[in-house]
């Protein structure tokens, strides 16, 4: 009779990183009771037990993917912390969502656009022509730097953030935005 060799967590983690799927299943199976016990600590929370377990499993997968023995902690300690953090994060997110008043939630796009009249074929054509003219202007009328500044500005980045991303000073960004504004004032559609 041959005795089955039980691999350590670290051995399983090495095999997982080498693509051995059965090792992933074994490690998840080994830590499933830990996930269940951590989820049970929060059983009186607003989330269902299955949701808590699911969040715990997500934490376990994060632990498997990010664990490094060089940090000094055992995998079991690290995994428990990741599982617990994942469940607590889900509970915090849920708590924030339930506090949002329904009046501040935007309706789905279909509901939003149902309240507006449809464009006529002529208006739709003119809108597409305007967008096309604007796109042409942006590529031909603005420098590559100005286009990048405009893209980041439209995404909501501050002058300082744009300056950091483009390795420039905020004054250069301000100057670029002023040039873009002047150029756009001269565009007609």
Image (cartoon, rainbow, N blue to C red):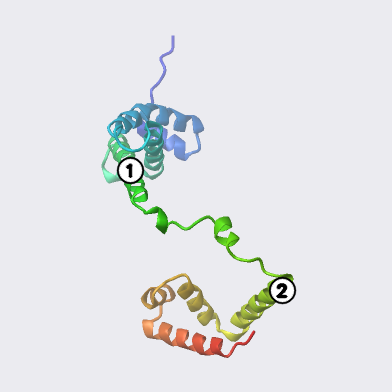
Cβ–Cβ below 8 Å for labels 1 and 2? Answer: no
Return the residue nearer the eye: 169 or 179: 179
Residue 122, position in %: x, y? 73, 74
For image coordinates 38% across by 45% down, the residue present is 66
Residue 31, position in %: x, y? 36, 30
Upstream in sequence: badge 1 or badge 2 = 1
Residue furthest to the top in view is 1
User: Is disc 2 placed on a helix, strand or loop?
Assistant: helix
Residue 41, position in %: x, y? 27, 32
User: Is disc 1 placed on a helix, strand or loop?
Assistant: helix
Dot 1 corresponds to which residue?
Answer: 91
Of tags 1 and 2, the one toward the viewer is 2
Viewport quadrant of the N terminus:
top left
* Residue 90 vertical position relative to residue 31 in the rendered view, above or below: below
For image coordinates 41% across by 84% down, the residue present is 174
Q: Which mark is residue 125?
A: 2
Alpha carbons under labels 1 and 2: distance apart = 49 Å
* Residue 130 vertical position relative to residue 18 in the rendered view, above or below: below
Residue furthest to the right in view is 121
Instruction: Kindly indicate the quadrant of the structure image that contains residue 168.
Output: bottom left
Residue 81, position in %: x, y? 29, 40
Circle 2 Cα neighbour tier, 10 Å, few/some/many (<14 / 14–19 / ≥20): few
Q: Which mark is residue 74?
A: none
Circle 1 Cα neighbour tier, 10 Å, few/some/many (<14 / 14–19 / ≥20): some
């Amino acid at each position: 009779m041959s005795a089955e060799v039980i691999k350590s967590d670290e051995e399983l983690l090495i095999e997982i990183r080498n693509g051995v799927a059965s090792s992933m299943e074994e490690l998840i199976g080994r830590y499933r009771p830990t996930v269940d016990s951590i989820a049970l600590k929060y059983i009186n929370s607003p989330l269902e037990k299955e949701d808590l377990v699911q969040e715990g499993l997500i934490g376990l997968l994060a632990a498997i993917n990010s664990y490094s023995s060089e940090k000094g902690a055992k995998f079991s300690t690290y995994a428990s912390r990741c599982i617990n953090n994942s469940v607590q994060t889900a509970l915090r997110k849920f708590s924030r969502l339930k506090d949002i008043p329904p009046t501040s939630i935007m309706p789905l796009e279909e509901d939003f656009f149902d309240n507006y009249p449809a464009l006529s074929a002529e208006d739709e054509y003119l809108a597409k022509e305007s967008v096309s003219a604007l796109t042409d202007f942006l590529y031909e009328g603005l420098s590559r730097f100005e286009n990048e500044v405009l893209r980041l500005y439209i995404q909501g980045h501050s002058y300082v953030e744009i300056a950091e991303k483009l390795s420039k000073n905020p004054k250069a960004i301000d100057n670029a935005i002023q040039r873009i504004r002047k150029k756009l004032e001269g565009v007609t559609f």
